[in-house]
Image (cartoon, grey):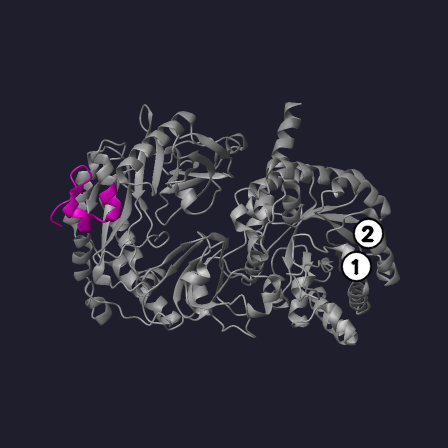
């Protein structure tokens, strides 16, 4: 190791040695901006270290010059190779004089703690726009032995399975990767976060303590929206910040401490006091300072930047520092980037299949990323076995997004131009967390979907076996429609199925025919058998837990249509269509009666889009004719999604409504006058708008007053988990979510109930 590269001395010609992140941080530090001091262990040090590895294995002996021509399609081999390489690095010894040089340089800061940050440069100038999650910063004490461990831990991340896969997929060989290590002092922080600047608008994310809570996705940060030209804060959104991180120095701390994190036990997570959770993390004075500094840096480096920042606690003061600057680089012409909205979590690499709007195929190859202008529920038969979804239209609550979340596949919606910019057969990296799509270089061989999910898909429904879960009083239910998911979902810690979507379930058996057409063609008995058997599968799997079957909610883009009328967000929605033509509704009731007669007493009926008490009475009469109330456990509920229910709920209860389920998606679009399928309106489709939250609160309280249960089954509790506290405080009896959100919603409910119990206990003590 020849030298260390100090941030205040790095020159343009040093860029490849120190990496892009350190280079830009150095540039703004030398311009006088508030950047922590630091130095870089250059990329050649890693190469020298790899050359010292003493192993007879050819794979390791060839490092760092090996191009690692791995078969990334062979999942097991990839994991084995990655594990072997990382173990070799972790168990090796960093030359003591290297560690001593770093320690002596860092000791001058007189700080007890350090952070080692990865700083990459690709010698082919093929800079990647986003490699978040591949390489992570490492915290350590300022001690020689610990510095050596931290250095190896950071270097070893270059050889994780997902890293090897990424380099291979974008056509970058190991000798072309320059990994520098930026070493900086670190103190505890009052607040930390990210500033994203774009030419049109900025946003600032903030949380209490060190920034690891945001990096790990363990908090929903506060968000400030900034008008870029004036620097005016146009909107503030309070996040859901239940925990924070600090350095684990063993000092006294008032908040409830959790288990130390990381292998070194060096960082400590702690629970925030309830009062602190309800406060914005970033003090106003530092908010204004951050905006001012951001404006100056934008003038120097360009309009589109991502900056990490921290308000550090120093001995006698606090100070704002910029800790990282990411400048988007020109991407290789073979790497196409498309931005959309992340609608279903996970990352996947697979080949594309473009779905033509003019002609839909009979089937789609398995393991592909399906790209379409819009995914409507009638596309459901085509989605079995695909790896991911990209649509040009739609928002977070569009049917395509809901389907993707239920099927457990990553999805990006509102990706403008996807069907024209991309072609069938191209290889893509789809990031459903960030809403980003990359066209990748390399061979055209398809990555098997199931192998890739095991590698980089971060949200996957598995046979979840709950252990040591806290007891919750609020019922947690699950939204379902696909019988193929029953085996995976029935072991989740849920109290039943809060929403069995009939229109999506029936698409598996209807083919291309509207259910009314089956009846017209004399196939009523056949359809009845198919439908009752599908419902029976759910009843059998979850018995004795209740299932709420929602009867068909007609939309011309929901089911194969009988007419050529233009579709709308309303159309012949819900019960109105039953009154116009009751045959299909009567068939559904017969199917439910058949399931009841089979011995299953856990089936209930949920009526969609009820506009008036007269509509409900019509349905109640049909239900009585079918004999469903003969089973005492049977309940007839309605969806509370049409705003008229806010005024009529007492009348509905008098007419026999046994419970309500709030559909936040439709309630929001009807209260705010927004079509939720239009992704461009996503900024104003706000399920926590004061009008929507006020309506939800009113419905819960009216249900309580009427003595009936009230559930909620829209996307709001999943997209905005911070409202769960309010829902439970208001008296919601159950929350129903997609399978992928069950575990985190369970924990959110437990925390919310615990806070209510503690608050009640404190009030009692004070009295």
Q: Which residue is mark 1?
A: 578
Which residue is at 51% across, 34% downward? 277
Q: Which residue is mark 2?
A: 615
Which residue is at 64% across, 26% downward? 765
Q: Where 503 falls versus 723 (above or below)? A: below
Stretch of the chain drawn in magenta: 1-24
Q: Where 696 falls versus 51 (above or below)? A: above
Local crowd at mark 1 within 10 Å, few (<14), some, or many (≥20)? many
Q: Where 284 falls versus 438 (above or below)? A: above
Question: Do tag 2 and tag 1 residues touch (Cβ < 8 Å)?
Answer: yes
* Residue 716 coordinates in the image, percent (x, y): 60, 46
- Is residue 745 found inside the magenta-colored segment of the image? no
- Which of 81/103 is in front? 81
Marker disc for residue 258: none
Q: Quadrant of the C terminus?
A: top right
Does dot 1 land on a helix, a strand or a loop? helix
* Residue 553 coordinates in the image, percent (x, y): 71, 58
- Report if residue 143 is visible in the image: no
Which quadrant would residue 143 be assigned to in this image?
top left
Residue 659 as seen in the image, left or right of residue 500: right
* Residue 570 coordinates in the image, percent (x, y): 68, 52
Q: CA distance from mark 2 to mark 1?
A: 9 Å
- Report if residue 757 is visible in the image: yes
Which residue is at 81% across, 62% downward? 582
Which quadrant would residue 726 be assigned to in this image?
top right
- Which of 357/337 is in front? 357
- Is residue 22 found inside the magenta-colored segment of the image? yes
Which is more N-terminal, label 1 or label 2?
Answer: 1
- Which of 326/48 is in front? 326
């Amino acid at each position: 190791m020849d030298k260390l590269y100090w941030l205040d001395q790095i020159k343009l010609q040093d860029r490849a040695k120190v990496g892009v992140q350190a280079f830009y941080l150095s540039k703004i530090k030398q311009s006088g901006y508030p950047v922590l001091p630091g130095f870089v262990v250059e990329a050649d040090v890693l190469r020298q270290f790899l050359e010292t590895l003493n192993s007879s294995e050819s794979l390791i002996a060839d490092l760092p010059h090996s191009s690692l021509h791995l078969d990334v399609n062979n999942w097991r081999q990839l994991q084995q190779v990655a594990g072997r390489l990382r173990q070799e690095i972790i168990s090796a010894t960093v030359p003591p004089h290297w560690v001593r040089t770093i320690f002596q340089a860092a000791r001058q800061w007189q700080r007890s703690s350090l952070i080692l940050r990865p700083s990459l440069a690709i010698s082919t100038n093929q800079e990647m726009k986003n490699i978040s999650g591949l390489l992570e910063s490492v915290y350590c004490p300022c001690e020689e032995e610990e510095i050596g461990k931290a250095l190896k831990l950071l270097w070893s991340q270059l050889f994780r399975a997902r890293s090897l896969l990424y380099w291979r997929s974008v056509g970058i060989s190991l000798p072309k990767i320059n990994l520098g290590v930026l070493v900086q002092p670190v103190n505890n922080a009052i607040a930390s976060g990210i500033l994203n600047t774009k030419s049109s608008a900025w946003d600032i994310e903030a949380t209490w303590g060190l920034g690891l809570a945001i990096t790990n996705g363990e908090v929903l940060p506060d968000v400030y929206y900034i008008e870029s030209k004036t620097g005016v804060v146009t909107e503030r959104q309070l996040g859901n910040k239940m925990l924070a991180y600090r350095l684990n120095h063993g000092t006294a701390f008032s908040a409830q401490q959790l288990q130390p994190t990381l292998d070194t036990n060096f960082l400590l997570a702690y629970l925030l006091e309830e009062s602190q959770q309800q406060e914005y993390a970033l003090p106003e004075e530092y908010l204004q300072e951050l905006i001012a500094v951001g404006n100056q840096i934008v003038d120097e480096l360009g309009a589109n930047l991502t900056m990490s920042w921290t308000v550090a606690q120093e001995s006698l003061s606090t100070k704002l520092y910029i800790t990282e600057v990411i400048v988007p680089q020109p991407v290789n012409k073979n790497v196409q980037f498309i931005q959309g909205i992340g609608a279903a979590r996970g990352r996947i690499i697979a080949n594309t299949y473009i779905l033509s709007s003019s002609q839909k195929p009979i089937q789609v190859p398995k393991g592909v990323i399906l790209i379409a202008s819009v995914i409507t529920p009638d596309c459901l038969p085509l989605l079995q076995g695909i790896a991911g979804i990209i649509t040009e239209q739609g928002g977070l609550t569009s049917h395509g997004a809901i389907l993707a979340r239920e099927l457990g596949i990553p999805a990006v919606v509102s990706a403008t131009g996807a069907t024209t910019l991309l072609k069938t057969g191209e290889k893509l990296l789809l990031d459903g967390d960030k809403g980003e799509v990359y066209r990748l270089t390399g061979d055209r061989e398809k990555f098997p979907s199931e192998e890739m999910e095991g590698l980089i898909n971060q949200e996957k429904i598995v046979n979840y076996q709950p252990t040591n879960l806290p007891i919750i009083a609020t019922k947690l239910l699950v939204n379902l429609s696909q019988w193929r998911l029953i085996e995976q979902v029935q072991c989740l810690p849920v109290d039943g199925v809060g929403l069995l979507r009939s229109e999506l379930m029936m698409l598996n058996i209807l083919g291309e025919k509207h259910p009314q057409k089956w009846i017209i063609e004399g196939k009523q008995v056949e359809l009845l058998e198919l439908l009752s058997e599908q419902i029976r599968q759910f009843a059998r799997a979850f018995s004795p837990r209740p299932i709420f079957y929602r009867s068909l909610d007609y939309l011309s883009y929901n089911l194969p249509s009988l007419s050529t009328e233009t579709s709308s967000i309303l159309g012949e929605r819900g019960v109105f269509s039953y009154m116009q033509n009751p045959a299909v509704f009567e068939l559904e009731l017969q199917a439910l009666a058949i399931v009841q007669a089979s011995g299953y007493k856990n089936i209930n009926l949920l009526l969609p889009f009820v506009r008036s008490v007269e509509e409900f009475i019509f349905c109640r009469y049909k239900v009585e004719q079918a004999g469903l109330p003969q089973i005492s456990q049977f309940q007839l509920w309605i969806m509370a999604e049409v705003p008229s229910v806010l005024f009529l709920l007492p009348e509905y209860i008098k007419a026999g409504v046994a419970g309500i389920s709030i559909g936040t998606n439709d309630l929001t679009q009807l209260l705010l006058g927004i079509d939720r399928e239009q992704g461009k309106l996503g900024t104003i489709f706000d399920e926590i708008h004061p009008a929507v939250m006020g309506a939800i609160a009113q419905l819960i309280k009216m249900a309580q007053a009427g003595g009936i249960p009230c559930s909620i089954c829209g996307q709001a509790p999943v997209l905005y988990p911070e409202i769960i506290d309010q829902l439970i405080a208001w008296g919601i009896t159950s929350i129903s979510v997609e399978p992928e959100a069950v575990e985190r919603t369970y924990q959110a409910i437990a925390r919310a109930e615990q806070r209510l119990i503690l608050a009640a206990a404190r009030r009692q003590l004070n009295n």
